[in-house]
Image: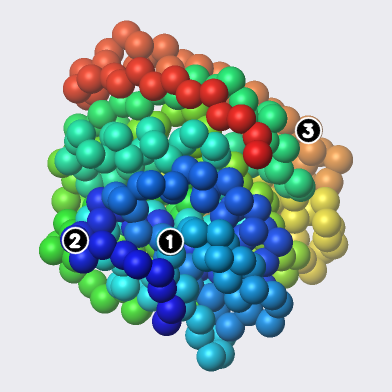
Amino acid sequence: MTQTSQSSEQPLLTIAIPTYNRSRCLAQLLEILAPQLAGESRIELVISDNASPDDTSTVVASFRGKGLSLIYDREEKNIGPDANFLKCFREARGKYVWIFGDDDIILPGSLRKVLDLLSENECDLIHVGFLGSSGTLVLERFSCVQIKAEIIENSSEMVKRANHSLSFISANIVNRDRVLANIERPLDELIGTNLLQLGWVYTALNYYIRGIHITGPLVAARDSATPDFDFVRVFGPKFVSITDRWLNEPKLRKIIINSVLKTFMPFCLIRSRRIRNDCVNNLSTERVASSAFRRYALYWAYNYPIITLPLWMAEFYWKFVQICNTLERRLRQLRIIMKPGTIRRTLALQTKPRAH
């Protein structure tokens, strides 16, 4: 492990970046992050290199040479993504920890907003708004955005706001001190699931007192999943099993699983069928998905038709699902306006990040 000077006092926030073989993405992230960290003593920046075979170490050295204060830890051999995430969480010193994907971006001007919120409010979980991109990130697309932060004092309401994106590692900041004080199961049992981050997110929800939900994108996310990534198996049996074992309140489990079934899983299923549409693959997908979700009515309404219908009919059904989700989202927004009882106060934040 190598590092530049770090304060002996506990940082307010640790930003830990687990990385592997993505030096170009990491360079773009650090290029935008470095100006936001200039003169900022409240943050510890950690980069955990999982034995990258590319020039990641050279990229990190170049930013350190420019004065970016950071801790750099490189493994001698690849320990797997989950183990690298866990190492980041365990070795972080900050009161809050933000495990951040090496292929995502903390948008210009965003970090100060997050720090101010953390300084002024004691929270268990902070969910950060994001927008996704399937290719090159065009930062101008995120300019002139209006940011709104809401303090949520009800775990059910927080889960309804964040939904299935509680599993998106770059969108969630947790109070590490409170997680470590309350965690009920060993995080090591989640290694190999591709969902280890749910361990600390669900622990934060189990002992939830207060959180912040930030709308408006502070994070730009790439869709960089490899073609062999098995979304159905990960967000089917594995996701359901972890949610059942790690999340204590049945009501919260139901909200999260239903969100996956209504929004995320239909998208994954139609994308999978567009790439590989054959009877063997469809049968395997149906078997895995049904084993995980058969007890949920929404699976049969939102997912099963997309798996089993001919592709051209599945495409039409996917459009129908999107329309249903849009209508439900707008109705929910209207109900929030009419009955904001679970929100203590709204913090109006405005920022106009500019591309670097």
Which residue appears farthest toward the top when viewing the image? 338
Q: Is there a contact, CB below 8 Å, between mark 1 and mark 2?
A: no
Residue at point 31% right, 26% down? 150
User: Could you say which quadrant of the image residue 158 lies in?
Assistant: top left
Residue type at mark 1? Answer: Ser
Residue type at mark 3? Answer: Phe
Determine which residue is flagged by label 2.
9
User: Could you say which quadrant of the image residue 159 lies in?
Assistant: top left
User: Could you say which quadrant of the image residue 314 lies in?
Assistant: top right
Residue at point 35% right, 11% down? 337
State the CA–CA distance, disc 1 to disc 3: 51 Å
Give the foreground label among 1 and 3. 1
Q: Answer left or right for 28 relative to 192.
A: right
State the CA–CA distance, disc 1 to disc 2: 15 Å
Q: Answer left or right for 176 relative to 52.
A: left
State the CA–CA distance, disc 3 to disc 2: 57 Å
Residue at point 54% right, 23% down? 352
Within 10 Å of the Cα at label 2, are there few (<14), some (14-19), or many (20+) other Cα atoms? few
Secondary structure at numbered mark 2: loop
Secondary structure at numbered mark 1: loop
In percent of width and height, residue 85 lies at: 44, 70
Q: Would residue 146 be visible to someone looking at this image?
A: yes
Judge by depth and name the residue closer to the eye, 340 or 24: 24
